[in-house]
Image (cartoon, helix red, strand yellow):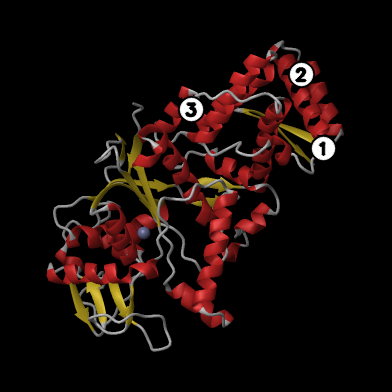
Amino acid sequence: MTTISLYNTLHRRKEEFKPIDSTNVRMYVCGPTVYDRAHLGNVKTPVVFDVLFRLLRHVYGEQNVNYVSNITDVDDKILNKHKETGKSIREITEQTYQWYVDDMAKLNVLAPTHRPRATEYIAEMIELLKLLLQNGHAYEAEGHVLFDFDSMPAYGSLSGRSMKEMLAGARIEVADYKKNPADFILWKPSAADQPGWDSPWGYGRPGWHLECSAMSSKLLGNSFDIHGGGSDLIFPHHENECAQSMCAHPGEHFANYWVHGGMLMVDGVKMSKSLGNFYTIDEVLAKAPAEALRLLFLSTHYHQPFNFTFDGLLQAKATLDKFYNALLRVVDVETAKVAPDNRVVEALADDLNTPLALSYLHELTNVLNKATQEDEQKTAKGLLLASAGMLGLLEQNPQDWFKGANNEDVAFIEAKIAERAAAKKAKNYALADAIREELKAQGIVLEDSPIGTTWKKI
Ligand SMILES: [Zn+2]
């Protein structure tokens, strides 16, 4: 069996992945708060964990992987949106949820086994609060229930921060009803016109962190394998989840492997509305197909900071043009039913090395391009498609990919790129340069990178 290794934030090192039960491999990934159109940062995480989901299914069997990704549909951001727009909360969350599901489908993100909504698990959250109160890790004050920070000496072990650092770096709300400023809210009172539920502590609503502890426990058990999310969630969200779950269920591990994706930047700086580099998914997808965005996300190792640029997006599209063009040539050839290239599986098993896996897709495309006999083409096509499937790529018909584009153009450019590569190999740099110039004169710019040559129209 393929051995998977993952960088575990909890121990700050890459570790061999050993599931608690290989017939029920369990993963939880924090999902979006549904109050507005998804932005780039919202969709990178599900794409990354979709590759891990595909890998786990490949290694352990499709039926043996249980993947939960939640939908936060009760949050003050939703409440603010309601005040701003006058739309009902239900209308806002339903509409945004549907946009999100549609975006995920466009990005070839497989539906998780469960996509639970926070508002459907209020009873479980209340039960969890009762356990925390019973175990002496929470207290009630003025209609609030708060986590008692001082009751958990191990708090901070996930992020490796001291309390002093945490208090200095976080926007911690100081309130009279808190025993310690670091105590965080588990439950808060709602006004009559705010969303809320009856509870032993009055009409109110949960704090944000609580839902993930309650839903993961209900759907995956008190100890499970992988917990994922963006690195911005490590503190306070994941620390607080750990605190709640481990104090409510003493002796359980909560999650054994904590996997976090690197932060997202745009043009080398943090994405933010105030910098004018904040993009929603529909803005990005107006410029290139969703599959190009997916490939772009996967071209950087998930653990590294990811830098989005529109140039990068167009290059990713050019790479897909190359892949689909190879498939277009053999569109009438049957596809061999073969397993994915083992090198692709091994690359992904090594802490999701997607850039290395992509470099093998370039190789497999070159093999397909060179195949001349039908049986060779059949095998090469099967191998490329099965391997790309591990990354959730090349799942559409090549004719559909090029719909609207001029196929002859694409074939011509690809032929020129191959001719130039051959010239470079033969050290005929004058010819290689002449080909580059010939294409440039037609508005086609070539760009060389370690994984091959891509092109874009200017
Ligand atoms: Zn969460």
Residue 222 at what x, y percent from top left? 23, 54
Going from the N terminus, do you reach mark 3 or mark 1 first?
3
Residue 140 at what x, y percent from top left? 20, 79
Q: Quadrant of ligand 1?
A: bottom left
Question: In the image, is 17 to the left or to the right of 98?
Answer: left
Task: Tell me the residue at 34%/29% (across/down).
Answer: 3
> Residue lying furthest bottom in this view?
192
Q: Nearer the viewer, residue 86 or 334?
A: 334
Q: Secondary structure at mark 2?
A: helix
Question: In the image, is 81 to the left or to the right of 433?
Answer: left
Task: Tell me the residue at 83%/22% (across/down).
Answer: 434
Going from the N terminus, do you reach mark 1 or mark 2 first?
1
Is residue 410 shown above or below 87? above
Is there any visible trace of residue 272 in the rendered image?
A: no
**Crowd tier of the residue under label 3, counting other residues whose Cα lies within 10 Å: few below 14, some 14–19, many 20 or above:** many
Q: Identify the amino acid type marked 3.
A: Val
Is residue 30 shown above or below 363? below
Identify residue for label 1. Answer: 406
Identify residue for label 2. Answer: 419
**Image mark for residue 147:** none
Determine the image quadrant of residue 238.
bottom left
Q: Identify the amino acid type marked 2.
A: Glu
Whether residues under marks 1 and 2 lie with C-beta atoms below 8 angstroms apart, the answer is no
Residue 34 at what x, y percent from top left? 49, 66
Task: Tell me the residue at 70%/14% (across/down).
Answer: 372
Alpha carbon separation for disc pair 2 and 3: 27 Å
Going from the N terminus, do you reach mark 2 or mark 3 first?
3
